[in-house]
Image (tube, helix red, strand yellow):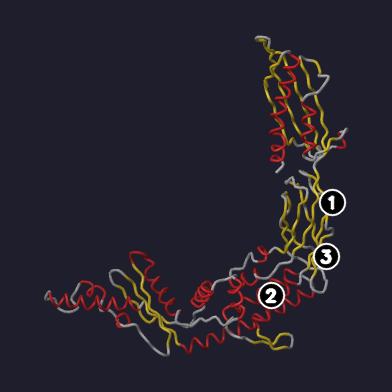
Amino acid sequence: MKLIFKTLTISSILFFISACGSGSSPGGGPEDASFGPKPAWLVQYPVDQNFYVGVGSASKTKYGSDAQKSAQDLALADLASQITVRITSDIVTTLIEKGQITEEEYMATARSEAIADLEGHELVDTWQDAGYHYAYYKLSKSKYAAIQARKRRAAISLSTDFLTKADEADKLNHFSDNFTATVQAFIPLLPYLNEALKADVNGQSVILSNEVNTRLQQLLTNITLTPNTANVSGKLGQPITNKLTVSATGSDGSPLRSLPLTVRFKKGAGELLESITTGSQGSVSLQVTSIKAALKLQILEVSVDVDRLLANEQSPVLVGIIRSIPMANTRIIVDVSNPRIYLETSEMFNGESLKQLQIEPRLKNHFIKEGFNFVDTKRDADWQMTLSASANQGTTYSGMFTTFADVSLNVVDRHTGDEIYKNSLSRVKGIDLSYENAANKAFNNAADKLIATVLPQILESIK
């Protein structure tokens, strides 16, 4: 900023010399005639031991009609930069060490809060030339100190009021209200983290920022999440039908109401209700509507939902504090089995059923190798698979016989009635020394094509 003033001063001198050299009278240029002489606070940056001062300039080309307001905003920012911001708070230092916030982020936040918090400043003067608007502000240091003292008292009063509300919510084991009130108790203290603001809380004199920070840490680290079972069984593509619940308790074992939780597959995949909240008894049900991954061992993880806790919080310091706290979590092992299959088959050649099936045994063998089981009755099945295959004679050439097979396969989920797979193959060719052998080859060629794609496509369809 001072460099700008020096440049402007040099420019003024050069302009004056140029004017004298051309025979014009001093101050007689068109710019001076339009805007008047440059004020002293632009020629030399003002210094006053009793005041914070700020000078700002804004280009008319860049800011247009907002140039005057922008100059005033920049002048206030210049003034605020003179109010020293130092990092002396253990809370902030710890956050920086943990990587939750950088020193630059904290300083930028502190400075922006200082600008927003300015009161008692006076607009001393404004000036403009052809290209810029300029503004000059000052703020009495004694007035600023008095205003800050008043604000500190207000912050202490507001913070202690919220701590009282947090205590009341704690007695009712209402986590959401307790947490919200504790966070609200922190917010008025954020501009004063570098100061040891003291207050009487529950008959004891405490440093408020430390007290609130300790309460936040205890509130979140003392949560215990307990599932009603450590292991549960499930089937691929099916919902978990066993009742699953998680209970949340505090440090004294009391149930925690209105605690936001999040549920996810730590290992595996499936459809589930991710965001849940504990009820009046401190417990909540888990809903897994479908298991999507073909893994035998999968893991459900339930943890405190930090994103919902921070949904309305803007302060990077508060966000950093809360994210630095290890959140409670618990896990449930899911033993996943494959669905049981009932298979209906029709394989025909020239309109007659085959005495020895060709596709069915190969298809069954493929699924059995992948861990699936076949059952003899529909009522015991999870999936119903229908295979239809027919081959017809084609042509003969040089003693070789040709047949063509048409094959269709579909799979239906018997619990929902949904078709989860459907495929058909047309005119799959088989050639051999007889029509019968050619038909068998056509069926086997069709089986090869089905086996190559059927299971991956089924698994993909249920994701």
Q: Is residue 463 left or right of residue 343?
A: left
- Label tally: 3
Dot 3 or dot 2: first in sequence order is 2
Q: Mark 1 points at which residue?
A: 242
Residue 61 x, y percent position in the rendering: 33, 64
Query: Where is residue 158 drawn, in percent x and y?
Result: 64, 80
Image height of 59 relative to 301, above or below? below
Secondary structure beneath label 2? helix
Give the residue at x 49% y 81%.
119
Please tell me whether mark 1 or mark 3 is closer to you in this view: 1
Percent x, y of residue 409: 74, 29
User: Residue tagged by mark 2?
Assistant: 182
Q: Looking at numbered disc 3 in the image, what kind of residue is underneath it?
A: Gln
Tell me, yes or no, whether the two marked residues, 1 and 2, touch with CB atoms within 8 Å. Answer: no
Numbered tag placed on residue 281 in the rendering:
3
Q: Give the percent coordinates (x, y) of residue 268.
A: 72, 50
Q: What separation in Å lies between label 1 and label 2 (alpha carbons)?
A: 37 Å
- Mark 3 is surrounded, within 10 Å at the Cα level, by few (under 14), some (14 to 19) or many (20 or more) other residues, namely some
Q: Residue at x 42, y 73 (%)?
A: 73
Q: Nearer the viewer, mark 1 or mark 2?
A: 1
Q: Give the CA distance from mark 3 to mark 2.
A: 22 Å
